[in-house]
Structures are given as C-alpha cells and as structure tokens.
Image (cartoon, rainbow, N blue to C red):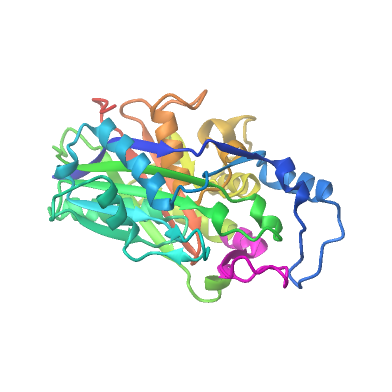
Amino acid sequence: MIRSIITGTGHYLPTKIIKSDHFLKYSFYDQKGFKIKKSNQEIIKNFKKITEIEERRYVHEGLLNSDIATIAAKKALLNSKIYKEKIDYIISAHNYGDINPLSYQSDVMPSIASRVKNKLKINNHKCRPYDMIFGCPGWIEGMILADQLIRSKYAQNILITSSETLSKVIDPHDQNAMIFSDGAGAAVLSAVDVDTKEENYGILYFDSQCNNNEELHYLTNGPSLNPNYKKSLLNIRMNGRKIYEYALTEFPKMLKNILDHVNLHLNDIKKILIHQANAKMDYAILKRLLKLYNYSSIKKGLYKKLMPMTIQKFGNSSVATVPTLLDLILKGEMPHHKIQPGDTILMASLGAGMNINGMIYRFPIKNNF
C-alpha cells in the first residue's frame, strides 16, 4: 500500500524582530473610522494579555514572499536528501503572493509555486507548480492534496511550501496589525510502500471543513480604518469575535471526528501542532477538545506539553505557523518538546473562508531525520 511520509522539513524566520513598543507610535482607529481614545500603552497591554504575543518577525525590505518560500524549500530539500529534479509537484500555500513594493498590491502572476520552481532552478518540465489559496490552513491542505496525488501514483516526491509577508498588508491603524507576522515553512512528502500488516505510518487520515456563507466575511481585505491613509488599498480586515466563536464551535468537533475515524484517542497523540492564531483562542480550542473526551480535570502544564506554542515570539505568520513549528521540533530547536520515531501527531489549522482542517501523521519507527 502506498503511503506518504515526510522526508524533509525546513523553515525561514526573518531576522527583523518587532517588539510591542514598535506600535507605540501608531495611531489606532475603530471600525467606524474614529481614532481610539485609549492610550497605546493600554491597547498594547490588553492585546498582549489576550494573544500572548510579545514579538513578531518582519522580512527586510527587498525580500518577497517567493524568496522566503524558496529559502525554506531549499532547507527541506537538503534535509530530505532528494535531488530537486526528482520533485514531481510544487504546491505553494499563501494568500497574498508577492507584494509589489511600489503599489503594495498582491501579485500572483505568475504563481508563487512557479516562482519558487524558477528560483530553485528546477529544469524538470514535468515538475508541476500549484498554488494553494486556502487561508491559514493552506499548508495542511497542500499536504492533503500531495498525499492524494502520491496515493494515486501520480507523484513520487512533492514539495509543499508555505509563506507569507503579512507585514506588507497590515493596516497600521488597526489593532489587529499587532497579530500578524512573516515567515515560511516547507516539507517534502514522498511515496513509500507500506506493509499494512506490520506497519502503519505516514499520513493516516485528514479532513477539511469549509463554511463559506456568512463566515466568508470574517476575514477579508479592505481599506484602512483611517480614511486618510492612502498607502495601500489592500489591508487585512478581521472580525476577531466571530472567528473566535466559530473556532470554538466547529474546530474541536472536527478534530475529534478525525481521531474517531481511525479509532484513535486523544491519549494516542504525542503533540497537537495547531495554527498559531492567538494564544487565548488556541488554549480555548484545546480545552473544548479535552472536554469532548470527558476530562474532568486538566493538569497544570498539560496545555503547553501537548500543544507547543510559538506565537509569543513569532506572531501569526498564517500558512507558515504549523510547518515552522514542526521543523523546529524535529530539528531540536523547541525546548521541552521532542517527536520520536513512532510518535503520532495531530496538525490542525483554521483561517479565512472559514476553512478548517486537520491531519494525523505517524512517524516511521526508522527515523528519517
């Protein structure tokens, strides 16, 4: 039986660290276009209390989305030891593409995957570039597509990248600007012939759920909250309350259904790698999931042990959060967190659409890293 296994991972974290005091100079406006009367100190303090974000990363001027995707891709290819010309597909998850440095508008022609292929100098004309526009769950959805292509025997090796430069599309007059960050992650997924009588590893199961009615408008683009701001007409607009309510209602149920489908219990999961949206929401999602398993009491520290967090230092880099977290753990760069051969993890994400997805992955007994 053909299964998909992760043979290499990589990530890129911009070196430009943006601390909270960076936003003291901002002028924040409310949804009605009026300047908020609270002091920036108070706004930043309340924001940090909810999200736990202390720092975020921004790319340096001149670096494009496709550039950082390529950096992460090179690391994943090197880690996999697979020759780049053996890659059958490149699937690039993102939302905004390369941001034009003059117009500050989204540029996705040619596609980001095509640009990554070009920058990797892959000459194989049978290597097909696909873009995955699926909100923050884009990288996991890219992995899902790659798994289906591999199981259908259309591919042997697939490179899945995830990258975003959200610092270039935030509204400096919106408090939500403090959430977003830049970054890139990548993985190589390869085909392996598994004897199901003795071994069961790789991608075990996945699912996606897409609520695109009124939920479509929870996370969109729009003009600045400041009517006098003219630098960019394309800015992230987020209804945080609606997203929070949707996440707590729909996400835990879907994750349990995924585990139930393959007869696994939450106790079988070593780590939950969840999209780093904001700390309050992620903790609330895990709490709801634990309640579905009738946990009467939750031991102190279980949250951080089961669900590693990076948002405090890296912010929300959209599609890049989950693969970045995965690579950090596998490379031994996340203190107190390890993934061993044979471990089973659950990766999950939620984002614009609203789209949510999850994937169960079991690492081979023979460690590929």
Q: Quadrant of residue 170?
A: bottom right
Reply above or below: 113 against 346: below
**Which residue is at the front of the view, 135 or 228?**
228
Looking at this view, name the residue that lies furthest to the bottom: 213
Left or right: residue 141 versus residue 126 is: right
Give the total of numbered labels.
Answer: 0
Q: Quadrant of residue 310?
A: top right
Q: Position of residue 78 (x, y in %)?
A: 26, 32
Q: Is residue 54 magenta?
A: no
Reply above or below: 16 against 25: above
Report the span colored magenta.
218-246
**Which residue is at the front of the view, 125 or 339?**
125
Q: Position of residue 5 (x, y in %)?
A: 24, 39
Q: Is residue 232 magenta?
A: yes
Looking at this view, name the residue that lies furthest to the front: 102
Which quadrant, please, contains the N terminus? top left
Is residue 358 visible in this depiction of the protein?
no
Q: Position of residue 136 (x, y in %)?
A: 47, 55
Is residue 205 visible in this depiction of the protein?
yes
Reply above or below: 345 against 136: above
**Which residue is at the front of the view, 242 or 100?**
100
Residue found 34% across the figure and 52% down from its top: 206
Residue found 71% across the figure and 56% down from its top: 175
Q: Quadrant of residue 238?
A: bottom right
Residue found 44% across the figure and 31% down from its top: 328
Left or right: residue 357 versus residue 205 is: right
Q: Position of residue 235 (x, y in %)?
A: 59, 65
Which quadrant, please, contains the C terminus? top left
Left or right: residue 184 versus residue 142 is: right
